[in-house]
Amino acid sequence: MPEPDQRLFFLLQRAAHRLRTTADRRCLAAAGVTTAQLGALFAVQDRPGITQQELARALGLRESAVTALVGRLTAADLLLKRAHPSEHRAVVLELTEPGAAALRAARPEVDRVNAELRELLGDEGFVRTAGALHRLAHWER
């Protein structure tokens, strides 16, 4: 039997693509939002009043990408932009009721995807994989 592929970066890319497309399809069906949009909505829910710059850092995205993402979310009435209380060029982001409803609608699907991954990897494998991915996400060279 041949050894499994050991090209970790390649495998992570393939796995991320498969997970993203599957989760996007399911979250779009359940809540009308993609996983990228959910990430932004969850970040704003967790940190009300977050700025776009802070959101970019939290999501690990360029500010230009977050500007476009926030534009789509505000156009869909899922986020609200307000003037920052002390920085005249900054805006703060707030979740709208439709945004909160989208999060509530997506939560069961997010939980199902995680449960399926836990079943696929086993409890120990799930915890170890989550820990390894957390370390990779915060790796700096």
Image (cartoon, grey):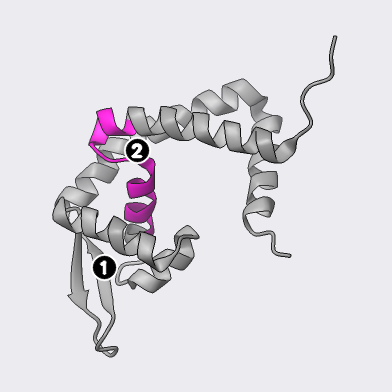
Three-letter residue code for mark 1: Leu
The dot on residue 28 is none
Element under label 2? helix
Q: Position of residue 119 (x, y in %)?
A: 58, 22
Three-letter residue code for mark 2: Arg
Q: Which residue: 30% across, 72% down?
A: 49
User: What's the distance in space between the residues labelled 1 and 2, CA to CA?
Assistant: 21 Å
On the image, numbered disc 1 is attached to which residue? Answer: 93
Q: Is residue 138 above or below residue 7?
A: below
Element under label 1? strand
Q: Is residue 23 left or right of residue 85?
A: right
On the image, numbered disc 2 is attached to which residue? Answer: 107
In the image, the segment drawn in magenta is: 27-43
Do the residues bearing badges 1 and 2 touch, measured as CB atoms within 8 Å? no
Q: Which residue: 24% across, 89% down?
A: 88
Camera-side residue of 26 and 4:
4
Q: Nearer the viewer, mark 1 or mark 2?
A: 1
